[in-house]
């Protein structure tokens, strides 16, 4: 008689092992392992081997290129993040903190698509149909082809698809839906894995675009197993505080387009709308003050002018504070060490705080020069002209290095009526912005 196979699974990250452990070696959670039944083990095998038919390798020259068809959601920012529009048969996951606007955005998108003559199903597992109707009234999202279904059982959702054909489905949220064939609670690893697998097969077989709303953990990642992000075609994250007007939708995975694009939305009384003229939303030119410098960063193909704010103050603690909002704290410590070594600025007795205005997070190194300029400006209490932008990466040896897309950045600076730019090397093309070369950190002091 064959020995029964025992398998334990972490309910936080989905890591599986044949022995029970008190602490998960993958995510570090304590007492998170539960024993899986034979049925649940079969589900894992099914989802990990979703293609039972043996495939034959083909020469890449014999494979014909498949043209991806898209349809617009009538929202410029979301179309940009998705790479040009929604792909029929795609499975998209949107995550974000509570109250950031995930449900509001997708309900409005569903109404836009329904207005184009497509049938849209909005499945809500967290709210009643009346609550969604109140939001739809506020968003002016009442359309004949937009259908609401308050249901948490997957089988009933699939049964609704037999009554009417849909081109677009919204699941709000994936953690509230459960399958009656699985004996585990909604939101568990097994439930989320199986439901996502069933929805993925539904999207591919019937060419239905499905959007899933996912909760996030306190660490900022989408709750549930990591396999959830691997199974879907696109993963989008909402960034921004619920108390701020601007929200940023960033793509982290996209099988049908680039992952570097962002969408900027503005929360108003009528809901989330595409932010127009965002170029001037992240900096203020009304008043010149010390500790403020401008830079131009690239978010995908979009240049954005940012205001870097720095505050250097006397420290009364043995270990001065170094804190950054919207900027990598480790890179800030590196830049401060460089200032002390190369420019002999005694910052070991001062607290240093960095803030990127507008709530955006810098993910590239082109703002290094602006960070240094803002710190020196605050330390010496000398203001920097708002007509100047600082663009350059700072190395550990004190060199200022070039960044990509300099011509695009300078064109954006010219559109915002900025006349000067400090760069590592002047661009080959003639620019309307007057450029000054600065190849070493020590030369930055000449501007103060």
Image (cartoon, rainbow, N blue to C red):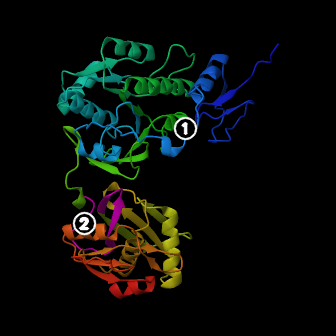
Please tell me which residue lies in front, 375 or 204.
204
Q: In this view, does 17 lie to the left or right of 330?
A: right
> Which residue lies at the image location 71% right of the left edge and 35% below the top edge?
22
> Which residue lies at the image location 26% right of the left edge and 23% below the top edge?
119
- The answer to which image quadrant residue 391 occupies is bottom left
For the C terminus, the image quarter is bottom left
Please tell me which residue lies in front, 204 or 74.
204
In the rendered image, the residue lying farthest to the front is 62
- The answer to which image quadrant residue 24 occupies is top right
- Crowding at mark 2 (Cα within 10 Å: few <14, some 14-19, many 20+): some
Please tell me which residue lies in front, 222 or 351.
222
Q: How far apart are marks 2 and 1 (CA)?
A: 39 Å
Q: Using the image, determine if residue 243 lies above or below residue 445.
A: above
Q: In this view, does 265 lie to the left or right of 356?
A: left
- The answer to which image quadrant residue 284 occupies is bottom left
The residue where tag 2 is placed is 412
Q: In this view, does 17 lie to the left or right of 192?
A: right
Circle 1 SS class: loop
């Amino acid at each position: 008689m064959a020995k029964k196979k025992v398998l334990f699974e972490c309910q936080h990250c989905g890591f599986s092992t044949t022995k029970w452990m008190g602490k998960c070696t993958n995510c570090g959670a304590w007492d998170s392992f539960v024993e899986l039944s034979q049925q649940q083990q079969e589900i894992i095998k099914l989802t990990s081997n979703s293609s039972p038919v043996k495939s034959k390798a083909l020469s890449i020259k014999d494979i014909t290129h498949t043209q991806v068809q898209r349809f617009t959601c009538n929202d410029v920012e979301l179309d940009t993040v998705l790479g040009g529009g929604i792909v029929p048969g795609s499975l998209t996951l949107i995550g974000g903190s509570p109250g950031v606007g995930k449900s509001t955005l997708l309900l409005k998108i569903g109404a836009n698509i329904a207005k184009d003559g497509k049938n849209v199903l909005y499945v809500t597992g967290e709210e009643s149909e009346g609550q969604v109707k109140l939001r739809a009234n506020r968003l002016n999202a009442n359309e004949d082809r937009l259908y609401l279904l308050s249901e948490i059982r997957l089988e009933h959702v699939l049964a609704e698809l037999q009554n009417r054909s849909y081109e677009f489905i919204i699941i709000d949220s994936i953690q509230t839906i459960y399958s009656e064939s699985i004996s585990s609670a909604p939101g568990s690893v097994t439930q989320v894995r199986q439901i996502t697998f069933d929805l993925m097969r539904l999207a591919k077989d019937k060419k239905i675009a499905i959007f899933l709303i996912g909760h996030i953990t306190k660490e900022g990642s989408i709750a549930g197993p990591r396999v959830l992000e691997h199974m879907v075609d696109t993963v989008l994250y909402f960034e921004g505080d619920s108390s701020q007007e601007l929200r940023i939708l960033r793509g982290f995975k996209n099988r049908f387009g680039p992952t570097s694009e962002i969408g900027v939305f503005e929360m108003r009384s009528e809901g989330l709308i595409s932010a127009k003229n965002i170029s001037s939303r992240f900096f203020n030119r009304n008043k010149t003050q010390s500790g403020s410098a401008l830079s131009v960063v690239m978010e995908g193909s979009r240049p954005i002018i940012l205001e870097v704010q720095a505050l250097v103050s006397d420290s009364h603690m043995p270990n001065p504070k170094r804190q950054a909002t919207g900027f990598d704290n480790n890179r800030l410590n590196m830049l401060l060490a460089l200032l002390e070594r190369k420019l002999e600025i005694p910052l070991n007795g001062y607290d240093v705080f960095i803030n990127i205005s507008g709530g955006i997070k810098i993910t590239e190194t082109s703002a290094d020069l602006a960070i240094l300029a803002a710190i020196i400006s605050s330390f010496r209490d000398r203001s920097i002209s708002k007509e100047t932008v600082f663009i350059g990466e700072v190395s550990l040896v004190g060199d200022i290095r070039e960044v990509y897309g300099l011509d695009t950045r300078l064109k954006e600076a010219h559109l915002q009526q900025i006349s000067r730019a400090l760069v590592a090397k002047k661009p080959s093309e003639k620019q309307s912005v007057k450029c000054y070369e600065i190849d070493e950190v020590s030369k930055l002091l000449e501007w103060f």
